[in-house]
Each structure stands twice: as structure tokens, then as C-alpha cells.
Image (cartoon, helix red, strand yellow):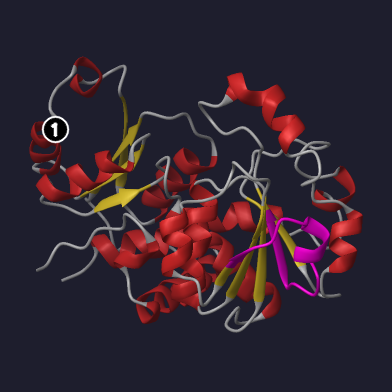
């Protein structure tokens, strides 16, 4: 059997991503109905955390339990990873004892190296460059509330960060248009933008960018590791807050999403994130169901 990894959305085909999304919706219904389904019985997922987490740890750990398996939490403080053991050695050893490895870390090269030397699937649970698991949840959430996102227009507001990069990949894989509105100096990877130029554009004026869009998405202004830039970023992003004025520019059925945690009064106003157009709580819960579908796809394959 060929080992499949999930480092970015591009590691799966559009058809496979659709399969996982619809399977996630099925698994969600089964879970809510109290149905026991354990395709990963006696399987173990190693969860390597070099960055802190709430939703990622809970969703993967609970997901493995619900699928009949076990999740093993590993922090760099408690393993040889934090003492300089080569990634190649860690990948070989850990993968010889478990059935899958999930990593939440800094450099994207770390998950790429782990995948190269691992004998089991590697799942990117966030790097500085990409956050593909969040996009599985976001696409599922849109599907549940508005149907297919194909042909729609999405607006990313704020920093050209790992979430923005994953939305660029999603635009290609799920077939939608993506507008990015951000201040100069905070652009996403321009090679990625240029490679997807037929679907992706940068519009500096946020209200112009919001015109008739179907989905508005944002993230905190200062991500993990950027706390010392908080004041500088507050000034730079002052005009890039998602508020009622921006939502009013969007289509009347437009939704609002945020990967959380959110800072009300900074990147989004309270009346938007807690308002009728917000689906952030469904989006957060869907991390569990989307990742269960991913785990089943990668780890229950014959």
C-alpha cells in the first residue's frame, strides 16, 4: 500500500477532498446519533506538538477515541525531539511504533522531512506556511450552510499567513475565486499567488474587496511567535477589521468564518463574530468531524 501524507491540500485530489468532506458530514451525523463506529480500533496516532493548541489537540484526540483508536500526546519538552535528535531518526523510530503521526510545528520543512522518512502517514496540523486541516473544516462548514463553494467568491482579510496560503490552495482544489485584502508588507507568498493568478487577486481596499463576496474569513493580526509585533500589527491592520460595514458590502447570504482564537475588537467586531452571519462555532466543531474523515481515509486504507 502506498503511504499517503497530508501536508497541504495539494496532497489530495479535488475528488478526494470532496470525498472526505462528504464523509465528514456523514460521520458528524453518526456521532450526533450516538452511533459507535470504530474503523481505527487498536491503531495509534502520535501527536507531536511544538506549538500550543486547543482545537487541534482536542479534535484529534477525541477523534481517535471515537474511531476506536488511541492518540498519544508528545511535546518537544518531553521527548528527544526537544534535545536535538535528528528528524530523520525520530521519523523512523516513531513511525515504526504507531499507525499515523500528526505534527503541529514551525517550519514546513519539518513535516516534509518527517514525511520523507516516515513509514506511516504524516498529517500537518499547522506549520508557519500552511494549515490544511482547518480548511477541511471550513469547506465542510460552507457546504453544510450554503451548498457547494464551487464558483463562489471568498475574501481573506488580514495577514498573508499560513491560513491565507491554505485558502489559496483551496481556491484551486475546491474551484472558487479568492480575494485577499491586506496592507502592503503583509502579503502572502507571491510565488503561490502568481501560480494561482487565474483564481487569486490582492485588493488593497478592504471595502472594495468585500463587494458581493460569498464568504469572509479572517485570523488574528499577530499569530503565535509574533506577539512582540502586536502593537506594530495593530497599526498596520487598523483598516482591515471585519465589521458590519464590510459584511454589508458582501452578498446578502455571505457567511463569516474565523479559525479561532479570536480577539473581538481587533480583527473582528463582536457584532459580526457573534452575529447571524457567523458560523465560527460550527466551523470549530467541524475540525473534529473533518479530521475523523481524514484519519479514516489515511489510516484505515487497505
Residue 259 in the image, given as x and y percentages of width and height: 61, 48
- Start-end of magenta stretch: 201-217
Residue 97 or 113: which is nearer the viewer? 113
Quarter placement of the C terminus: bottom left
Q: How many dots with numbers? A: 1
Q: Which residue is mark 1?
A: 90
- Does the magenta-highlighted stretch encompass residue 209? yes
Q: Residue at the spot x=18%, y=19% of the render?
A: 84
Quarter placement of the N terminus: bottom left
Q: Residue at the spot x=21%, y=54% of the render?
A: 121
- Does the magenta-highlighted stretch encompass residue 102? no
| Residue 169 figure quarter | bottom left
Residue 23 in the image, given as x and y percentages of width and height: 44, 74
Q: Residue at the spot x=70%, y=39% of the render?
A: 262
Residue 37 visible somewhere in the drawing: no
Instruction: Kindly give the residue lying farthest to the front in the view shown.
Output: 184
Q: Is residue 15 left or right of residue 272?
A: left
Residue 111 in the image, given as x and y percentages of width and height: 26, 44
Q: Label 1 crowding class (10 Å Cα cut-off): few <14, some 14-19, many 20+?
A: some
Residue 165 or 65: which is nearer the viewer? 165
Residue 249 or 300: which is nearer the viewer? 249
Residue 57 in the image, given as x and y percentages of width and height: 45, 39
Q: Circle 1 — which element?
A: helix
Q: Residue at the spot x=35%, y=48% of the render?
A: 124
Residue 181 visible somewhere in the drawing: yes
Q: Is residue 245 above or below residue 226?
A: below
Q: Is residue 164 left or right of residue 235?
A: left
Amino acid at each position: 500500500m502506498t503511504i499517503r501524507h497530508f501536508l497541504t491540500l495539494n496532497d489530495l485530489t479535488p475528488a478526494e477532498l470532496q470525498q472526505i468532506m462528504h464523509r465528514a458530514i456523514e460521520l458528524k451525523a453518526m456521532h450526533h446519533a450516538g452511533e459507535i463506529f470504530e474503523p481505527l480500533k487498536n491503531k495509534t496516532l502520535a501527536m507531536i506538538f511544538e506549538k500550543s493548541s486547543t482545537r487541534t489537540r482536542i479534535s484529534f484526540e477525541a477523534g481517535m477515541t471515537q474511531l476506536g483508536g488511541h492518540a498519544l500526546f508528545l511535546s518537544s519538552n518531553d521527548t528527544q525531539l526537544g534535545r536535538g535528535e535528528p528528524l530523520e531518526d525520530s521519523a523512523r523510530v516513531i513511525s515504526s511504533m504507531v499507525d499515523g503521526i500528526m505534527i503541529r510545528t514551525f517550519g514546513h520543512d519539518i513535516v516534509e522531512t518527517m514525511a520523507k522518512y516516515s513509514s506511516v502517514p504524516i498529517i500537518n496540523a499547522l506549520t508557519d506556511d500552511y494549515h490544511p486541516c482547518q480548511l477541511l473544516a471550513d469547506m465542510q462548514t460552507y457546504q453544510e450552510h450554503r451548498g457547494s463553494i464551487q464558483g463562489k467568491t471568498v475574501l481573506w482579510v488580514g495577514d498573508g499567513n499560513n491560513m491565507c496560503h491554505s485558502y489559496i490552495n483551496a481556491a484551486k482544489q475546491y474551484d472558487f475565486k479568492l480575494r485577499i485584502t491586506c496592507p502592503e508588507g503583509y502579503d502572502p507568498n507571491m510565488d503561490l499567488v502568481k501560480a494561482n493568478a487565474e483564481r487569486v487577486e490582492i485588493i488593497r481596499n478592504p471595502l472594495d474587496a468585500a463587494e458581493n463576496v460569498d464568504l469572509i474569513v479572517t485570523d488574528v493580526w499577530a499569530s503565535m511567535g509574533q506577539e512582540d509585533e502586536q502593537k506594530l500589527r495593530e497599526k498596520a491592520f487598523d483598516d482591515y477589521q471585519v465589521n458590519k460595514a464590510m459584511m454589508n458590502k458582501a452578498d446578502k447570504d455571505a457567511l463569516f468564518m474565523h479559525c479561532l482564537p479570536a480577539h473581538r475588537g481587533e480583527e473582528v467586531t463582536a457584532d459580526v463574530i457573534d452575529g447571524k452571519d457567523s458560523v465560527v462555532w460550527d466551523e470549530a466543531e467541524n475540525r473534529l468531524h473533518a479530521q475523523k474523515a481524514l484519519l479514516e481515509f489515511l489510516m484505515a486504507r487497505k
